[in-house]
Amino acid sequence: MKDKKQTLFIVLASIFLTNAILAEMIGIKIFSAEATLGIPPANIPLFGEWVLDFNLTAGVIIWPVVFITTDVINEYFGKKGVRKISYLAVACISYAFLVIYLITLLPPADFWMEVNSTDSEGNPFNINYAFKVIFRQGLGIIIGSLVAFLIGQLLDVFVFQKLRKLTGSKMIWLRATGSTLISQFIDSFVVLGIAFYILAPESSRWSLPQLISVGTINYIYKFVVAIALTPLIYLAHNLIDKYLGKELSEQLQEEAAAGSEGFF
């Protein structure tokens, strides 16, 4: 029984960490959801001066996997399990960014610069500069992302367990979706507020209407995805219950609920 519990946590933790780190790494790219779907830009007027399209960070593509894994860990390992993996994720992401930053400081080899001096159309190309731009994100974005991630995770587990007390072992969809919708509402605005308002240089600081507008677009996406992925929560639960067996599964869920008081 102990081996199954440890194996389950290792598998869930691996999925969680892999996708959390990847989401941070690829998050620098902004893509057009409309162009991806082959439809015209939305051109949504928000707060008067801002007209927004669904331009999203590439990280949101795999971030829903983090939502689902968080809820599954929450269900079987409670607040302690989510808190443990969240702190570990912050440490791993911080380490990854530190290593990337140090790598960008290394002087490039001359032959590497020479063989990559032009693009596919023969235009001048500085591959070292491109490497730095792609992999070195601003300090504000890094801090904002990590703070938002940690607050979102702690809020998610708190709301999840509060809803579990009201629903018992039933209505998995309510506590999973409800906790995600509330925590990601905060997350959507915290990361932007820190990165582009609080820590941003005055010359590039966003206005509050712009911050609220972009945060709203991000949250709309997360809202829709959280609801759409509800069936996967049930699929994950069914697979885990079969792996653990009914007795161990119920035992873990009861222990998780009993040891998840408070926010921290």
Image (cartoon, rainbow, N blue to C red):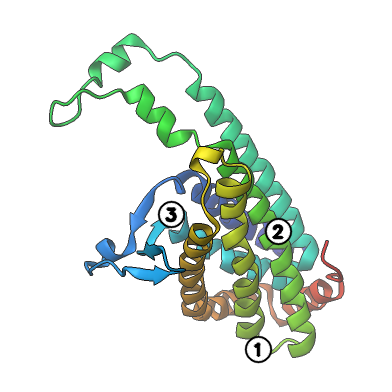
Tell which circle, 1 or 2, labels the residue nearer the N-terminal end: 2
Screen quadrant of the C terminus: bottom right
The residue where tag 3 is placed is 57
Identity of the residue drawn at 45% across and 13% down: 107
Q: Nearer the viewer, residue 170 or 149?
A: 149
Q: Which residue position is annotated with label 2?
A: 151
Type of amino acid at the residue the image marks with label 3 = Thr
Tell me the mark number nearer the camera, choosing from 1 and 3.
Answer: 3
Residue 139 versus residue 89 in the image, above or below: above
Q: Which mark is residue 12?
A: none
> Label 1, label 3: how many angstroms apart (C-alpha)?
32 Å
**Residue occupying image coordinates x 64% and y 48%:** 146
In the picture shown, does residue 219 fall above or below 178?
above
Disc 1 crowd rating (10 Å Cα; few below 14, some 14-19, many 20+) is: few
Q: Amino acid at mark 1?
A: Met
Front position in the image: 15 or 5: 15
* Residue denoted by label 1: 171
With 249 as the anchor, is 239 left or right in this view? left
Residue 22: image location, x then y, percent:
50, 48
Which is nearer the N-term, disc 1 or disc 3? 3
Give whichever of discs 3 and 2 has the lower sequence position. 3
Mark 1 residue element: loop
- Percent position (x, y) of residue 144? 62, 48
Q: Amino acid at mark 2?
A: Ile
Decide: is 106 above or below 16: above
Cα distance, mark 1 to mark 2?
25 Å
Farthest front residue in view: 48
Left or right of residue 264: residue 61: left
Answer above or below: position of 12 versus 98: below
Residue 122 lies left or right of residue 2; in this view the side is left
Spatial separation of the CA atoms under disc 3 and disc 2: 20 Å
Question: Which quadrant would the N terminus be assigned to in this image?
Answer: bottom right
